[in-house]
Image (spheres, rainbow, N blue to C red):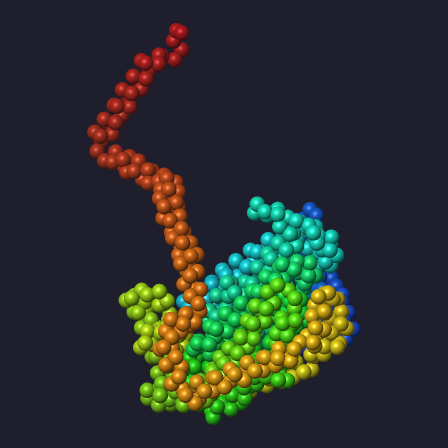
């Protein structure tokens, strides 16, 4: 069964990727989606089988390789944590495949797209079923490669290529630390298999390791290096910059990457290696602090974004911060539970946003929307469900998991827990505000897409395209004219000088000639929304007792530590009433503030932006991390590479090497060619000179055979 779960997506990817042009786009869609659906059904069966009694087993596949003292077997580690991830990955991936049949129906490269989706899913399944660190690293790099292919799927767009490379390079930074952590764990334990590592770890509780001229607590150093990989893959603070740019890929890709798969890989890795982190409390403190900062930072940026997908992307980044707070304070079950519930409502929000974009003819700027509730009522209802689940409205999925993390952060005694508690509570307020801001700008208020279309409803698409071109052109001219910091290519500026996103990137590349008024998506796109909406509403209620309630010990078995995590899980029930009520108060305040600013007094946001231009630009430009990294890392690297290319490679190596030698050969041959004049007397003269030279040589050296 487990072999089928893992390899059926790979089979679908190979069929669509290798034979897609022969079997056609429709058959490629059906094969890949069918393979994923079968894997999802088996995953749910495995989930109820494994979690019924918390059983754990290892399923061998093959011996991978053996080198010296290192032997790596290919095997599946099956326990409750694996079963949870199998359900999340295969279920969301199946719905994304089904949704993509409708969303990508006009794209001529659908076989390639579906092959990439299935390859991504296979790599993620390899990661979550890994029995050792090497196999996990294989899946880890596999999802990185597949995400590069998916983000840059529309490779004709320079912005898509840049976003794909950015995601790949930023993740390499984190993966460098992850690989060093794997090396250190092998040095310390002599193994890369999880069972052997966890058995050896208690003996290393006080061990030290010399690194960079200092003595470090060995397990703390190993866990920090491993967490560096999680920071890159899960887009945590400082290594988060690739996540919003990944919106350049098709919307189903955003749902797959940001909801249940790639970005949750870091959360899964920390949960899987929790027995190591339990012995490294300093590393857990770092996890807690980074998670809290990420939750707060991403929420502040989401307040002012105008692209509907970017708002949801920063929401993902913030929610991942919540998950790491749960892991960092030792309440591992809460972090994994939020991963589980988040997959449903975040996939719902992304696919719902895709339905909006589809209805709006590929428009993504919320300022060009409004009043869509009357045109796409089903999508509006689905987005409403996703929104209330995200903000943690009582009895929805987010309510059970997010509130548990906030209460665990308050009840923890780990250093940094106060910062994490305050950050998550404030982030809850901002999450409610930007979520309802998105909803009101998109579905309520005046129909700004009518005013935006200069020639009425039917010309909306042409107007959107013209607006996008004008915005990008204006951005380029503004950038060249003033060169002011914060004005960068690809970002337009309004009449007050504030940076704004171009109306739509995809409107430029994916516009067709048949403009139309907003319309509801086809069934193949709305059915996945309905299924995800059910999960967003009821998954928390159905599974809360198993994940974080009375049945937790039986449910998790030995998949998660039974140390401080369980203590905190019991302490949650003793949290003060005001702590338990604080998330609800925040979501109500956020709703009222958004309602007042975008329904009752819609002129307020513009006035607020005018009165606080520095803060507005600071948030709109994402704390200027891209500009800072460009100045500190990108430009010096480019200049250094240019120097090595022009001076080192061009002038020195080529100048004195191949180019220099070839140039001298050419010079000599040019001189020799001059001797080939075609005149007989020139050749006779040369012969005479040669005879004279031979005679001279005989006279100087003596006649051979003469006296000595």
Q: Position of residue 476 (x, y in %)?
A: 32, 69
Visible residue check, residue 303: yes
Observer-nearest of 697 and 360:
360
Determine the residue positioned at 43% across, 64% down. 626
Locate residue 455: give its quadrant.
Answer: bottom left
Q: Position of residue 483 (x, y in %)?
A: 31, 64
| Quadrant that contains the C terminus | top left
Observer-nearest of 59 and 331:
331
Determine the residue positioned at 43% across, 90% down. 600
Visible residue check, residue 9: no
Q: How many marks?
A: 0
Determine the residue positioned at 55% across, 71% down. 423
Residue 1 horizontal side relative to residue 449, left or right: right
| Quadrant that contains the N terminus | bottom right
The single residue placed furthest to the bottom in the displayed view is 374
Q: Position of residue 367 (x, y in %)?
A: 40, 82
Determine the residue positioned at 33% across, 37% down. 664
Locate residue 400: give its quadrant.
Answer: bottom right
Locate residue 612: give its quadrant.
Answer: bottom left
Q: Position of residue 164 (x, y in %)?
A: 48, 65
Residue 93 horizontal side relative to residue 479, left or right: right
Vertical position of residue 572 compared to residue 227: above or below: below
Residue 32 horizontal side relative to residue 594, left or right: right
Vertical position of residue 41 compared to residue 686: above or below: below
């Amino acid at each position: 069964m487990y072999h089928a779960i893992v390899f059926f997506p790979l089979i679908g990817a190979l069929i669509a990727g290798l034979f897609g042009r022969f079997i056609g786009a429709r058959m490629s869609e059906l094969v890949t989606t069918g393979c994923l659906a079968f894997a999802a059904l088996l995953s749910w069966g495995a989930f109820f089988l494994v979690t019924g009694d918390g059983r754990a087993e290892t399923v061998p596949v093959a011996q991978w390789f053996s080198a010296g003292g290192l032997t790596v077997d290919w095997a599946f580690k099956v326990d409750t944590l694996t079963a949870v991830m199998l359900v999340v990955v295969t279920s969301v991936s199946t719905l994304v495949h089904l949704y993509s049949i409708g969303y990508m129906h006009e794209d001529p490269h659908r076989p390639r797209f579906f092959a990439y989706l299935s390859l991504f899913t296979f790599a993620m399944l390899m990661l979550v079923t890994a029995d050792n660190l090497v196999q996990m690293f294989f899946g880890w790099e596999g999802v990185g490669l597949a995400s590069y292919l998916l983000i840059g799927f529309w490779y004709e767009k320079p912005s898509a290529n840049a976003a794909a490379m950015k995601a790949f390079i930023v993740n390499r930074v984190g993966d460098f630390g992850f690989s060093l952590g794997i090396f250190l764990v092998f040095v310390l334990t002599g193994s890369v298999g999880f069972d052997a590592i966890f058995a050896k770890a208690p003996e290393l509780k006080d061990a030290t390791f010399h690194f960079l001229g200092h003595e470090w607590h060995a397990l703390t150093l190993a866990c920090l290096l491993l967490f560096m990989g999680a920071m890159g893959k899960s887009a945590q603070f400082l290594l988060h910059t690739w996540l919003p740019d990944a919106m350049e890929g098709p919307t189903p890709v955003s749902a797959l990457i940001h909801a249940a798969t790639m970005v949750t890989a870091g959360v899964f890795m920390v949960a899987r290696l929790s027995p190591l982190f339990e012995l490294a409390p300093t590393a857990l403190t770092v996890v807690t602090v980074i998670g809290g900062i990420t939750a707060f930072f991403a929420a502040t940026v989401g307040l002012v974004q105008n692209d509907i997908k970017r708002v949801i992307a920063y929401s993902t980044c913030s929610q991942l911060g919540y998950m790491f707070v749960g892991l960092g304070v030792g309440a591992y079950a809460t972090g994994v539970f939020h991963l589980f519930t988040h997959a449903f409502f975040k996939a719902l929000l992304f696919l719902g946003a895709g339905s909006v974009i589809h209805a709006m003819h590929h428009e993504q700027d919320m300022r060009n929307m409004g009043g869509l509730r009357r045109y796409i009522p089903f999508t509006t209802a689905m987005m409403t469900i996703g929104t209330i689940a995200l903000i943690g409205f009582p009895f929805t999925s987010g309510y059970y998991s997010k509130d548990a993390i906030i209460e665990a952060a308050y009840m923890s005694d780990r250093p940094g827990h106060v910062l994490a508690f305050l950050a998550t509570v404030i982030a809850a307020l901002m999450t409610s505000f930007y979520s309802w801001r998105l909803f009101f700008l998109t579905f309520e208020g005046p129909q700004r897409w009518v005013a935006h279309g200069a020639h009425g409803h039917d010309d909306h698409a042409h107007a959107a395209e013209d607006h996008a071109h004008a915005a990008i052109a204006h951005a380029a001219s503004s950038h060249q004219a003033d060169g002011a910091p914060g004005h960068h290519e690809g970002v337009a500026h309004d009449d007050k000088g504030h940076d704004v996103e171009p109306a739509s990137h995809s409107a430029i590349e994916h516009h067709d000639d048949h403009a139309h008024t907003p319309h509801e998506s086809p069934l193949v796109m709305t059915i996945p929304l309905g299924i995800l909406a059910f999960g967003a509403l009821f998954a928390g209620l159905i599974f809360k007792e198993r994940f974080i309630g009375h049945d937790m010990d039986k449910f998790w078995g030995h998949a998660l530590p039974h140390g401080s995590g369980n203590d905190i899980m019991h302490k949650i029930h003793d949290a003060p009433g005001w702590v338990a009520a604080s998330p609800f108060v925040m979501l109500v305040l956020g709703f009222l503030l958004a309602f007042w600013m975008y329904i009752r007094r819609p002129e307020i946001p513009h006035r607020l932006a005018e009165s606080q231009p520095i803060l507005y630009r600071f948030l709109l430009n994402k704390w200027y991390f891209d500009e800072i990294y460009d100045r500190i890392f990108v430009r010096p690297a480019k200049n250094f590479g240019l120097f090595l290319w022009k001076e080192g490679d061009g002038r020195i190596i080529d100048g004195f090497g191949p180019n220099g030698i070839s140039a001298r050969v050419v010079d000599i041959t040019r001189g020799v060619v001059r001797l080939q004049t075609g005149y007989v007397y020139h050749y006779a003269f040369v012969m005479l000179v040669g005879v004279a030279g031979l005679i001279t040589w005989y006279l100087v050296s003596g006649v051979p055979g003469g006296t000595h």
